Image: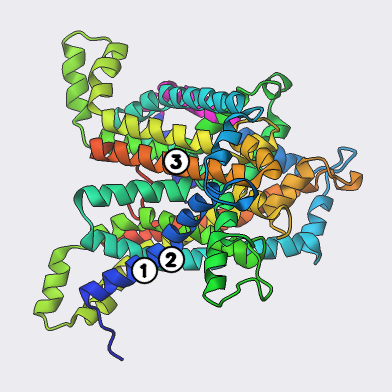
Amino acid sequence: MKIPLNKWSLIGFTLFLAILIFVIPLFGAAQFSFKGSGGKGHSWVNYQWLLHQDGFYPSLLTSLKLSVLAGILNLLLMVPTMVYLNLKGQRFKVLVDFLCILPLIIPVVSLAIGAQVAMPEFMQNTEYELVFFFVIISLPYTYRALDTSLQTVQLKTLVESSRSLGASWVRTIISVIVPSIRSGITGALFLTFALAIGEYTITSLLHWETFPTWTVVAGQQNILGAIAISVFSFIGAIALLTTIALFSKKSAPKMIEVGE
Amino acid sequence: MELVGARFSIRRAGRGASVFPLIPFFAFTGFFLIWPVLAVTLRSLHGNKGEWTFQNYQPILKSGPYLHAFVTSIKLSLITSIIGSLLGALFAFVIVRYASGKFGAIIDSVSAVFANSGGVPLAFMFVAAFGTEGVVTQILKSLGWDIYAGHFTIFSFTGVVMVYSFFQIPLMVLVFKPAIAGLRKEWHEASINLGASQLTYVRRVAIPILFPSFIGAFFLLFAGGFSAYATARALTVGTVPLVPIIIGTLVDGNVISDQANLGDALAVGMIVVSAIAMIGYVWAQRTAAKWRSQ
């Protein structure tokens, strides 16, 4: 049997599949979200409904707040850790790498149940406990993003020159290392933020209300409104990521790569 | 293997670099990652009166709704990771070959959104497209194909397979693209110069080299699909029995008193299945790295 590996037939076939699998559902949902009341005509009514719904702003605000905190905490924890690993602590790298890949191995549902069992009561009484778990689930991506960009700079040389010119360690990290791995840091920050703002599993199992869990509850009353939120957040995320990718190609989020 | 290596390096490190700067990291992951897993494992091994027991695992091991849930979950992740890895590999190949520069960057970010930001919005989107009143359903109906004529609904197993494929394929693209990009031009030229056809090159050179990476990505997709919760939760409301959904229901309070720790046992069971998949991932990753360095 001869398979025609013609360039254009291959591209055409792939495009056809892409349209079938991705474009049509997205387009269908977008069209659905503009349905007018009673399913007639087209209007913004579902989007307006959304904005006037109880809990829209509070839950969105909570999500934004927690995601920003998770991003900051993640960097405070991981930048010094990764710098040290690549500078002196190579011997610990296997262990840290393993711990950072664990959140992919441990299903988030299991982690959430564990959190319920293990966290002390004062932590379980505040929504800020979510911040810590958002940091945990973004570890696999943060590790890769920071590690990749740290490996592209001459870390030892940078640190030695900075230290021999009299800079302290803190100063060296803040004004020498951080600027030189900016792409990795923005990548890590963005990924943590994106994961945190869309996180549903831990949040709902620990019974907190953020934007995603609010969406599900709101969707039970008004499915059109929920579809409107979904389309809005999808398009918004794509627009945001594309803008970032186009303006700084290096800081495009890095996923786990097989066989790296 | 990873763990043994890690323990070994701790012992040796005493003579070299200090562990001190890593204490925040170890404390953080210890408290928020290791301790919860340990705690749930320990509680799953205890009965209602605090005695040690293996009782909580009985419902999973003997045939019944819980074993059935595991089978359904594994079946779902197997099917969607097969679909995802095959189609995703095709997409990745075409993207690496023919889409470059800014267009490639856009595809990257779109894939990242599709693969990661899924969850809840994804479920609602598919209801809009393929629900009884959905846009796609209506279009197909006007073309003479009523997808709801048979047993199909978007809330069924087949429906969940469709939605999961939506995030598995782009995940595969993201994960597998670097492996394809790593294929060297020289290999292609060499085999063509030696008289191989395009197809022979793909069959005898490209596929064998990419195979370990492909298998690794497959396992990663499997683990991801197996532990996905949000999408199925928002979509099915329990119509398809998946382990994460059942755990969610147990947590929400519908617990029969003698099954108090059943949720813990289910959670540990999920860790075990997922860990087996990730062992496959690590193994494949190492094989792939070995191939590359030769």
C-alpha distance separating marks 2 and 1: 6 Å
Which chain does the numbered disc 2 sit on? Answer: A
Which chain does the numbered disc 1 sit on? Answer: A
Can you tell which quarter of the image residue B147 is in?
bottom right
Q: Which of the pair A170/B96 is nearer the observer?
A: B96
- Same chain for labels 3 and 1? Say yes or no: yes
User: With A113 as the anchor, is A79 left or right in this view?
Assistant: left
Q: Residue beneath label 2, please?
A: A20
Residue type, label 2: Leu
> Which percent across, then down, holds residue B10?
44, 34
- In this view of the protein, can residue B246 be seen by the observer? yes
Task: Confirm whether the magenta stretch covers residue B239.
Answer: no
Q: Which of the pair B87/A73 is nearer the observer?
A: B87
Residue ID at (60%, 35%): A49
Residue ID at (46%, 57%): B281
Residue ID at (32%, 51%): B107
Residue type, label 3: Pro
Sort mark 2 into few (<14), some (14-19) or many (20+) by Cα contacts within 10 Å.
Answer: few
Q: Is residue A163 above or below residue A75?
A: above
Marks 2 and 1 in Cβ contact (< 8 Å): yes
- In the drawing, what numbered circle is on residue A247? none
Q: Residue beneath label 3, please?
A: A140
Q: Foreground mark, 3 or 1?
A: 1
| Residue stretch rendered in magenta on the structure | B14-32
- In this view of the protein, can residue A105 be seen by the observer? no
Q: Residue beneath label 1, please?
A: A16
Which chain does the numbered disc 3 sit on? Answer: A
> Which percent across, then down, holds residue A85?
35, 31
Q: Which of the pair B93/B101 is nearer the observer?
A: B101
